[in-house]
Image: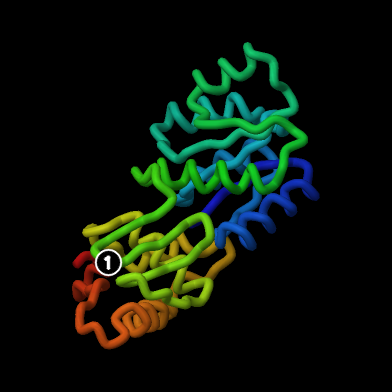
Amino acid sequence: MRVLVVEDERRLAANVARGLRESANCAVDLAHDGEDGLFMAQANPYDLIILDLMIPAIPGLELVRRLRAAGLPTPVLVLTARDEKEWVVKLLNAGADDYLTKPFDLGEMIARAKALIRRGKGHAAPVLRVADLELNTVDRTVRRAGRRVTLTAMEYRVLEYLLHRPRAVVSKVELLEHLYDYNWEKFSNVIEVYISGLRRKLENGTGRPLIHTLRGQGYILHD
């Protein structure tokens, strides 16, 4: 999953980004004011936007309004030092999906981020399933027919994204855009490498493939 963090306090932004990378296995882009945040949010396909309420150029509340007015459905988690009821109402009415009051616990922020990403993909439960394949987004474990499957960090990211889009054709470009941050070189055969590794580990002699290739279109996960 790919997350945009819009926060002008650079140390806090770095801590949030590090937590998302290490504990949620997310690709993270950073913006330090509302103008950059608006540009990046409209230019890239994010799975979640986390933004501070009090940011320069375009304040957080106005940024949420502009994103929703532009028809962008990406879930938004707002970080704010203000917890007055009228501000909470304004945030939610503007289109924010959730908020956290500063100072906040990083573990709680990551849990809320994961929940918003799941709900944004249409999955409320933390366990994603297709056939006998299960992926637990909380402890990041994968099982097939009850057997634990050990994946690399990037193999897990690819599988998690495919499980969020079961039975849909997912192109290589779409995978690259959701798995890597802004600085990644997107013209690469790295996706084929991860798909090959996933197939080998998930099948493991079962003879029942779950990831299928549609030539010239992409990949589809189904039983």
- Vertical comparison of 67 with 45: above or below: above
Q: Residue at x 55, y 45 (%)?
A: 113
Q: Secondary structure at mark 1?
A: loop
Q: Position of residue 128 (x, y in %)?
A: 36, 56
Q: Please state, as top left, top right, bottom left or bottom right, where the C terminus lies in the image.
A: bottom left
Query: Is 31 displayed left or right of 191 in the figure?
Result: right
Please state the horizontal and vertical placement of residue 43, each as a whole percent of the image: 48, 48
Three-letter amino acid code at the position of disc 1: Asp
**Front in this rendered view, residue 168 or 163:** 163
Is 66 left, or right, of 134 in this rendering?
right
Total numbered badges shown on the rendered structure:
1
Q: Which residue is mark 1?
A: 132
The structure residue drawn at horizontal position 22% and vertical position 59%, both measured from the top left corner, is: 167
Q: Position of residue 3 (x, y in %)?
A: 55, 51
In the image, 164 versus 50, the foreground residue is 164
Relative to 223, residue 138 above or below: above
Residue 65 appears left or right of 123 = right
* Occupied quadrant, residue 181: bottom right
Which residue is rendered at x = 72% and y = 48% of the image?
Answer: 13
Q: Residue 4 location in percent, x, y?
A: 57, 48
Q: Could one spot residue 192 in this view of the protein?
A: no
> Seen from this angle, which residue lies furthest top?
86
Q: Residues within 10 Å of mark 1 (few under 14, many from 20)?
A: few
Q: Is residue 109 visible?
A: yes
Residue 89, by quadrant, is top right
Is 151 on the left-hand or right-hand side of 23? left
Please tell me whether residue 124 is drawn above or below residue 218 in the rendered image.
Answer: above
